[in-house]
């Protein structure tokens, strides 16, 4: 293709496809066409397809000639098929030659485009085809890099280019009167094409309006609404939604079935972190000799520990209370909500049932621990992250089912309190969403703390013999019987999608069993939104709050402008010891998505503050675009990793690269310096041996004043020397950089 293109230019083949040449040959071509109509059409189609497939110039002039030679109707028919076939061949060529490498290199940045093309590619392509301001050959090549299907590309292109084809072919029927291509497309005609480009958008709006009208048809719409928005669920997503609505003076009602604050306050983040803090204290006491203390003894009452956890919850509860939100302007109702129509919600409270009408509804019903259908499991009433807070007696033997974040955090906690903990995980390692080296560190720590970790063990059933409970797990074709006093089920969470009207309204759920939403967080009813755990895809408190902003703003102001929810920079942390925190890609995800990256790793064993704190374990790992300091993701394993990840979150959100982090002063000695030193590792990896040799030669010149000629003479060879410098001491390199 390149050779043909060069030949096209070198041998000036392009002059055969100019308007002037065709006008000079018009009579000859017309005579040939009259004598050999089918042969002429076949030759014309072949030339047109080749030009278009190779993205050569000349297709526009060929379209004019089609009108002059074949007339309006036959010319339109011939050009319509020839141009579409040629465009599809160019599309296939771009896909075959370029798509894999482009997606591999820029896959993270193209993710949103790919998702949009997969969902609404025909609309995008149709719009571009209707507006000849966009060069069609560019569209052919660009669409080849996307996931749009070949057949879809073909038929949409043929339909979308038809209007422009007719205009050009019709102009070609008057070829003798045309002196330049600019004479065809007047400003008025171009403006018409641009307006025509809005047709798919109008069509999309019309289709959506028809769908909405159809789905609302069976529901009578009130003439007036009591409220601007009703929020179902007072967890993180619901509270933030209600807060925003009240802040902009909307009338909002917040309905909560159980406790204000939801899972995070009452059974999740807050109590678990309170428990982890006490467990950490016990662990530090057992490590007394590491801090120069001969011994330390800590006596504790587990019941008092759990009472402390409840005290912490009670202390924070006013932040999420009915009293506070009522003062903010939110109408808070404790009761059970039931959506009875797109504009009405029944709320059953102690005082009776109330029917409320509303312009919009935001579902923030949260989630609950998932209990798998393992024979005998429900019969023993297993503990979950919701129910374990009622414990006042420490279980002597605890089985933790599940190796995810919740299971790992609580397994380590109870082991530090003195339970004999056995953790059972179906997959090959704990925390499988993280890189293997992360799992290795965490599992090593668990082993040091006498936690029995059984990976690749499938829980088969729960048995009771002589009042003794056993978990029977399968591994390698054999069964293992694990005795326990309590079993904690921590295999994940399920969204609350039943019991409050979704089924009756026909609001669908997706494969993950969360509410199916579009990019604006709308359900199939445009005025009903969802946010938080019930919506997915991330079941974190901070993402629930993040989604709530979009749900609130789109519900209240979406008539004028809507915002697509942004999941591009989502951090999370697992609060084991050591902590694990991440934002963006990790290595295994980069491999799975075929995204090229460079990895810079800084070991915390070399960080002064980690050494002084006796926490010199773990690492900071940063993924960057090859040859660039642009951050694709970061993983931190170590003390306070959940706090340290924030610097990388800010950098990724605002497009700051590792050079910016490296150029920022960090207080010494702090754990935060690890981010700068990781940036230093990256910097040193991008210093070549040639650059260092040049600096050595330059400084030699500065010492002996022998003239700069020898230095400049060596410069070309040094520039070509791209050998990387051996890493050596990572912290020293970072400091020097």
Image: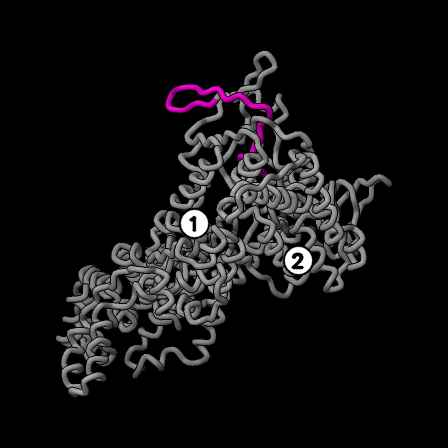
**Mark 1, secondary structure of its residue:** loop
At x 25%, y 78%, the residue is 19
Question: Disc 1 versus disc 2: distance between alpha carbons?
Answer: 43 Å
> Which x, y percent locates residue 731?
37, 61
Q: Which residue is mark 1?
A: 617
Q: Which residue is mark 2?
A: 552
Left of 217 or right of it: where is 409?
Answer: left
Question: From this viewpoint, is residue 472 visible?
Answer: yes
For the view shown, which residue lies furthest in the front direction?
294
Circle nearer the viewer, 1 or 2? 1
**Residue 349 falls inside the magenta stretch:** no
Give the mark, 1 or 2, whose residue is nearer the N terminus: 2
Q: Which residue is pictured at 45% across the width and 44% down the height?
A: 433
Q: Identify the residue at image location x=26%, y=64%.
A: 52
Q: Which residue is found at the position 45% from the left and 54% from the top?
A: 611
Tell me if residue 433 comes above or below residue 387 in the rendering: below
Q: Where, quadrant-wise, is the N terminus in this rendering? A: bottom left
Q: Which residues are magenta?
A: 473-494
Q: Quadrant of residue 300?
A: top right
| Magenta stretch: includes residue 484 | yes
> Whole-percent x and y of residue 172?
31, 74
Q: Secondary structure at mark 2?
A: helix
Instruction: From the top left corner, tell me how far across and down residue 180 is, in percent.
Output: 31, 82
Q: Is residue 413 left or right of residue 194?
A: right
Front residue of 82/105: it is: 105
Tally of marks: 2
């Amino acid at each position: 293709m390149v050779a043909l293109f060069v030949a096209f230019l070198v041998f000036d083949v392009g002059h055969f496809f100019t308007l002037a040449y065709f006008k000079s040959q018009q009579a000859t071509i017309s005579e040939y066409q009259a004598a050999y109509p089918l042969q002429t059409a076949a030759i014309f189609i072949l030339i047109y397809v080749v030009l278009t497939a190779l993205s050569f110039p000349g297709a526009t002039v060929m379209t004019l000639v089609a009108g002059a030679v074949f007339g309006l109707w036959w010319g339109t028919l011939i050009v319509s098929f020839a141009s579409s076939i040629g465009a599809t061949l160019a599309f296939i060529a771009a896909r075959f030659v370029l798509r894999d490498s482009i997606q591999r290199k820029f896959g993270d940045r193209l993710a949103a485009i790919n998702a949009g093309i997969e969902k609404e590619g025909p609309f995008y392509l149709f719009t571009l085809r209707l507006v000849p301001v966009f060069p069609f050959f560019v569209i052919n090549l660009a669409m080849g890099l996307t996931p749009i299907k070949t057949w879809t590309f073909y038929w949409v292109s043929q339909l979308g280019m038809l209007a422009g084809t007719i205009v050009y072919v019709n102009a070609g029927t008057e070829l003798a009167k045309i002196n330049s291509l600019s004479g065809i497309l007047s400003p008025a005609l171009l403006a018409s094409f641009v307006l025509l480009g809005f047709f798919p958008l109008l069509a999309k709006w019309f289709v959506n309006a028809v769908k909405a009208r159809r789905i609302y048809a069976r529901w009578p719409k009130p003439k007036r609404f009591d409220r601007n928005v009703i929020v179902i669920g007072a967890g993180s997503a619901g509270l933030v939604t209600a807060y925003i609505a009240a802040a902009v003076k909307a009338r909002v009602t917040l309905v909560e079935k159980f406790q204000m604050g939801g899972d995070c306050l009452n059974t999740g983040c807050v109590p678990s972190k309170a428990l982890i803090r006490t467990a950490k204290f016990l662990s530090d006491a057992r490590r007394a000799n590491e801090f120069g203390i001969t011994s330390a003894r800590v006596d504790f009452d587990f019941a008092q520990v759990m009472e402390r956890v409840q005290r912490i919850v009670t202390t924070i509860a006013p932040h999420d209370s009915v009293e506070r939100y009522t003062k903010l302007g939110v109408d808070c109702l404790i009761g059970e909500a039931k959506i009875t129509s797109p504009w009405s919600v029944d709320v059953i409270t102690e005082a009776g049932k109330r029917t409320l009408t509303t312009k919009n509804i935001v579902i923030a019903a949260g989630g609950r621990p998932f209990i798998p259908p393992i024979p005998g499991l429900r019969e023993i009433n297993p503990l979950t992250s919701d129910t374990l807070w009622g414990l006042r007696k420490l279980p002597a033997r605890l089985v933790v089912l599940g190796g995810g974040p919740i299971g790992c955090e609580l397994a380590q906690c109870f082991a530090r309190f003195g339970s004999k903990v056995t953790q059972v995980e179906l997959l090959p390692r704990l925390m499988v969403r993280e890189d293997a080296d992360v799992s290795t560190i965490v599992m090593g720590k668990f082993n040091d703390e006498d936690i029995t970790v059984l990976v690749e063990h499938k829980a088969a059933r729960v048995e009771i013999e002589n009042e003794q409970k056993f978990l029977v797990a399968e591994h390698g074709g054999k069964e293992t019987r694990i005795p326990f006093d309590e079993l904690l089920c921590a295999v994940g969470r399920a969204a609350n999608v039943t019991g409050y009207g979704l089924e009756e309204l026909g609001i669908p759920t997706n494969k993950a069993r969360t509410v199916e939403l579009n990019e604006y967080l709308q359900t199939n009813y445009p005025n009903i939104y969802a946010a938080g755990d019930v919506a997915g895809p991330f079941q974190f408190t901070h993402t629930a709050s993040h989604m709530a902003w979009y749900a609130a703003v789109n519900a209240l102001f979406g008539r004028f402008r809507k915002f697509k929810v942004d999941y591009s920079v989502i951090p999370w942390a697992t609060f084991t010891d050591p902590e694990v925190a991440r934002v963006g890609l990790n290595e295994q995800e980069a491999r799975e998505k075929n995204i090229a990256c460079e990895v810079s790793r800084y070991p915390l064993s070399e960080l002064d503050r980690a050494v002084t704190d006796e926490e010199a374990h773990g690492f900071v790992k940063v993924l960057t675009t090859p040859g660039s300091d642009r951050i694709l993701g970061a993983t931190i394993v170590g003390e306070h990793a959940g706090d340290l990840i924030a610097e990388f979150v800010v950098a990724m959100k605002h497009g700051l690269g590792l050079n910016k982090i490296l150029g920022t002063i960090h207080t010494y000695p702090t754990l935060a310096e690890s981010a700068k030193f990781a940036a230093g590792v990256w910097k040193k990896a991008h210093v070549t041996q040639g650059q260092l040799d040049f600096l050595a030669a330059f400084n030699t010149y500065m010492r002996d004043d022998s003239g700069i000629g020898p230095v400049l003479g060596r410069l070309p060879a040094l520039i070509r020397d791209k050998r990387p410098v051996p890493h050596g001491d990572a912290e020293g390199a970072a400091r020097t950089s």
